[in-house]
Image (tube, helix red, strand yellow):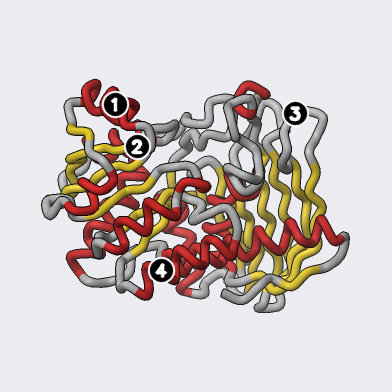
C-alpha cells in the first residue's frame, strides 16, 4: 500500500478522495493547501491529517503527491516535490501554456522524478477497447476523425474568482474541458500537423476566455479531421470521438463504443455513463480517477512510465496552443513539436 498526499482542496478534491478511499493500492494519508485553514478544515472533516507543503515534501512516509491546485499555482508546488525526489501525479493541465508546461516537465525529467498527468477518460472501458482496436490496426488506415465536445456551463460556474481567465486557467473550453477529449483523441489518431481554427466567447457567458472553438485538423498520417468544443451548448451533452478507417468506423460516446465494420457487422462495447458535460461539472464516477491513481502507483513499483507522462501531455498542450494561435492570427498554423 502506497501513501499519497493530496495538494489542493478545490472542486476535484472529493473525486480524488473517493478514488483513494476505494483503492486497495493507495492510501490518502495527508492533505495540504495554499491556505492552511482550508486544508485543516478538509482534513478534520474526512479524518486525515493536514500538513504544509514543506512537511509533505520531507515526509518519508508519503510515496507520491497528487497535485490538484489551479494551473497558476503549480510551479512552486512541483518544485518542492521534485527537489525532494518525490513522484508527482498532476491534475490536468500541466500549466497554463505550452512554455510553462514544458518547463515543469523538463524540471521533473532533469531530476529523474516520475511525473504523471490525470487524463481519466483513457480509463473508461470503451476507451481502452478502442485503443486496443487501433493498436491492432483492424479499423484500417485512418481517413477522418470527428471530435466534438458539446458541453454546458452556466454563468455561475464562470463567476467563481479566476475561472475562465488567462491568468488562472490559461484559457477556456480547450484547456479546461476539451483537453480530456483531445488527449484521448491524440492517443488514438497520432499527432496533428496543422490546424485552422476559430475561437470565440459566445453570448452565453460573460468571461475572458473562449467558450466556443471550431477547427479543421490535418493529421501527420494524412487523415483529416474536425473539432468542435464548447461550454455554451445548453443543456450539454456527451463528448464524442468518431474515427473513420478504411475497414470500419468507431464512435465513442457516453462511455459506449459503437463499431461499424465495412463488411456489415456492428459491435458495441462499454456502458453509458455520465461525463460531466452538463450543468454539474462533477457528474462523473470517481472510478476513472481511481484507475489513473492505481496505474501511477503500479508504475512506480514496476519502474515504468505511467499511462500518461508529463512529456506525453505536452502533445495536447501543443495542439491547444496551435488552435488558439490560429484563431488569433486568422490562418493555418503548424502544431509545435514537443
Q: Is residue 61 left or right of residue 179?
A: left
Foreground of the two, 148 or 93: 93
Q: Within 10 angstroms of label 4, few (less than 14), some, or many (20 or more) residues?
A: some
Q: Within 10 angstroms of label 3, few (less than 14), some, or many (20 or more) residues?
A: some
User: Which callout, 4 or 2, points at the residue further toward the start of the chain?
Assistant: 2
Vertical side of 34 occupied by 336: above or below: below
Vertical side of 49 occupied by 250: above or below: below
The Cα atoms of the two marked residues, 3 and 1, are separated by 31 Å
The answer to whether residue 258 is visible is no
Task: Tell me the quarter of the picture where residue 208 sits.
Answer: top right
Foreground of the two, 80 or 125: 80
User: Which residue does the numbered mark 4 point to in the structure image?
Assistant: 107
Look at the numbered discs 3 and 1 and tell me whether their residues touch, using CB distance below 8 Å: no
Checking the image for residue 33, the label placed there is 2
The secondary structure type at the circle numbered 1 is helix
The Cα atoms of the two marked residues, 1 and 2, are separated by 10 Å
Look at the numbered discs 4 and 2 and tell me whether their residues touch, using CB distance below 8 Å: no
Q: Within 10 angstroms of label 2, few (less than 14), some, or many (20 or more) residues?
A: many
The Cα atoms of the two marked residues, 4 and 2, are separated by 22 Å
Checking the image for residue 42, the label placed there is 1
User: Which callout, 1 or 2, points at the residue further toward the start of the chain?
Assistant: 2
The Cα atoms of the two marked residues, 1 and 4, are separated by 30 Å
Amino acid at each position: 500500500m502506497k501513501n499519497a498526499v493530496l495538494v489542493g482542496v478545490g472542486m476535484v478534491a472529493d473525486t480524488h478522495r473517493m478514488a483513494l478511499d476505494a483503492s486497495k493500492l493507495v492510501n490518502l494519508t495527508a492533505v495540504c493547501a495554499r491556505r492552511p485553514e482550508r486544508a485543516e478544515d478538509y482534513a478534520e472533516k474526512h479524518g486525515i491529517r493536514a500538513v504544509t507543503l514543506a512537511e509533505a515534501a520531507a515526509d518519508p512516509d508519503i510515496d507520491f503527491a497528487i497535485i490538484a491546485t489551479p494551473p497558476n499555482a503549480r510551479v512552486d508546488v512541483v518544485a518542492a516535490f521534485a527537489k525532494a525526489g518525490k513522484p508527482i501525479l498532476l491534475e490536468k493541465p500541466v500549466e497554463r501554456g505550452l512554455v510553462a508546461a514544458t518547463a515543469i516537465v523538463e524540471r521533473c525529467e532533469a531530476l529523474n522524478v516520475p511525473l504523471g498527468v490525470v487524463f481519466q477518460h483513457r480509463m473508461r472501458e470503451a476507451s481502452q477497447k478502442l485503443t486496443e482496436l487501433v493498436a491492432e490496426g483492424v479499423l484500417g488506415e485512418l481517413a477522418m476523425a470527428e471530435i466534438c465536445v458539446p458541453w454546458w456551463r452556466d454563468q455561475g460556474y464562470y463567476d467563481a474568482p479566476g475561472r475562465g481567465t488567462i491568468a488562472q486557467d490559461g484559457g477556456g473550453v480547450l484547456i479546461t474541458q476539451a483537453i480530456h477529449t483531445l488527449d484521448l483523441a491524440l492517443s488514438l489518431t497520432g499527432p496533428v500537423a496543422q490546424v485552422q481554427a476559430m475561437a470565440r466567447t459566445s453570448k452565453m457567458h460573460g468571461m475572458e476566455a473562449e467558450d466556443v472553438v471550431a477547427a479543421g485538423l490535418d493529421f501527420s498520417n494524412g487523415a483529416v479531421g474536425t473539432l468542435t468544443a464548447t461550454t455554451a451548448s445548453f443543456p450539454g451533452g456527451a463528448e464524442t470521438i468518431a474515427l473513420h478507417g478504411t475497414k470500419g468506423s468507431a464512435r465513442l460516446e457516453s462511455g459506449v463504443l459503437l463499431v461499424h465494420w465495412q463488411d456489415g457487422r456492428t459491435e458495441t462495447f462499454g456502458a453509458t455513463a455520465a461525463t460531466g458535460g452538463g450543468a454539474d461539472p462533477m457528474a462523473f464516477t470517481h472510478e476513472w480517477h481511481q484507475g489513473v491513481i492505481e496505474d501511477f502507483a503500479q508504475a512506480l513499483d514496476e519502474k515504468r512510465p505511467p499511462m500518461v507522462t508529463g512529456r506525453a501531455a505536452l502533445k495536447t498542450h501543443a495542439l491547444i496552443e496551435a488552435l488558439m494561435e490560429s484563431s488569433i492570427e486568422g490562418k493555418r498554423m503548424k502544431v509545435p513539436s514537443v
